[in-house]
Image (cartoon, rainbow, N blue to C red):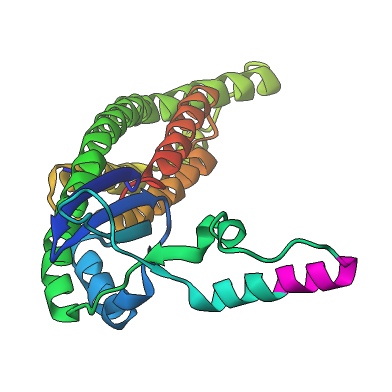
């Protein structure tokens, strides 16, 4: 089972008198990169939060947003307090305007009460240990939702990758079956060419056998075919496994490209060259797809 690196998860709950919301989004990334946005009161446990996330994910750029708001009072209102430094600043500025423009009006309570940002939620003493106990469960639930989405997308990726590997296997079988025919055809072309050039003279068959043997040795792709088949088998096994496979698959694709390039350079056959191009095209599509695999 493979997992995609893209997904989203959000959970909201009340704990320790606070409404907590954890939102997680993951994107493609070569390594694991965790980005946190959260209230300043949680800064002391930032390392612990990242550790928990790192235990669940091995690759991807994971953006985490944590919000915490005090629950409303029983009468439905939220406890407020004055932002006194801002009150004084507003009063000073209004008084300066009055003096500068010689205005007759006084700075009144009615005038000051119109500034809504003078009021802010009343802060309470927070128990960091208690906050973490509540937040840990909400974080785990958000990671579960993110993982579920990554698994769902990963299943679709896995089906596509398996289909492409199956196509590459079929093309490789065509190449392997074609290889002996290439030598036979070369022998026939060489014999015909020699007869045309010698115009009926006696032909040294041993020399033709020697040339054919040299070609057969140079164009032998048995090792490359066997190794490529082995890489395909490993690829399919990884798709069925449970661990993160993105980096391993990336390495296998490099090895597959190396083998198919060697097969292409050795064969010297137009029909085989067409199959090689098809395989390289499929490998390019696979490489593009695995950039999104954890």
- Does residue 230 show up? no
Looking at the picture, does residue 43 appear above or below residue 114?
below
Residue 84 located left or right of residue 160 = right
The image quadrant where one finds the N terminus is top left
Camera-side residue of 115 and 243: 115
Looking at the picture, does residue 57 appear above or below residue 264?
below
Residue 214 located left or right of residue 247 = right
Name of the residue lying farthest toward the front: 104
Camera-side residue of 186 and 294: 294
Q: Position of residue 172 (x, y in %)?
A: 34, 31
Residue 271 located left or right of residue 122 = right
Looking at the picture, does residue 147 appear above or below residue 32?
above
Q: Which residue is at 80% across, 68% downward?
A: 97
Q: Which residue is at 52% across, 60% downward?
A: 117
Extent of the magenta region: 93-102
268 in magenta: no
Q: Which residue is at 32% across, 49% downward?
A: 223
Q: Position of residue 47 (x, y in %)?
A: 28, 79
Camera-side residue of 179 and 56: 56
Q: Give the main secondary structure of the magenta stretch.
A: helix
Name of the residue lying farthest toward the bottom: 44
Q: Which residue is at 71% across, 65% downward?
A: 106
- Does residue 274 show up? yes
97 in magenta: yes
Looking at the picture, does residue 167 appear above or below residue 65?
above
């Amino acid at each position: 089972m493979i997992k995609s690196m893209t997904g989203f998860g959000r959970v909201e709950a009340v704990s320790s008198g606070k409404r907590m919301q954890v939102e997680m989004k993951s994107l493609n990334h070569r390594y694991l990169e965790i980005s946190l946005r959260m209230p300043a009161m949680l800064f002391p446990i930032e390392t612990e939060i990242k550790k928990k996330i790192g235990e669940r994910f091995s690759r991807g750029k994971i953006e985490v947003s944590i919000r915490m708001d005090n629950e409303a009072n029983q009468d439905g209102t939220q406890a407020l307090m004055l932002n006194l430094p801002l009150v004084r600043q507003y009063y000073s500025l209004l008084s300066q305007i009055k003096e500068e423009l010689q205005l007759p009006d006084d700075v009144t309570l009615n005038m000051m009460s119109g500034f809504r940002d003078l009021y802010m939620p009343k802060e309470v003493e927070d128990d960091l240990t208690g906050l973490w106990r509540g937040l840990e469960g909400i974080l785990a639930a958000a990671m579960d939702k993110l993982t579920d989405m990554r698994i769902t997308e990963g299943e679709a990726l896995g089906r596509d990758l398996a289909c492409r590997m199956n196509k590459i296997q079929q093309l490789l079988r065509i190449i392997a079956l074609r290889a002996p025919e290439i030598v036979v055809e070369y022998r026939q072309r060489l014999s015909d060419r020699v007869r045309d050039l010698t115009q009926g003279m006696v032909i040294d068959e041993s020399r033709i056998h020697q040339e054919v043997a040299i070609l057969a040795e140079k164009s032998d792709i048995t090792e490359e075919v066997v190794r490529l088949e082995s890489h395909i088998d490993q690829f399919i096994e990884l798709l069925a496994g449970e661990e993160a496979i993105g980096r391993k698959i990336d390495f296998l694709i490099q090895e597959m490209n190396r083998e198919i390039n060697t097969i292409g350079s050795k064969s010297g056959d137009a029909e085989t060259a067409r199959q090689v191009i098809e395989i390289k095209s499929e490998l390019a599509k696979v490489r593009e797809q695995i950039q999104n695999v954890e």
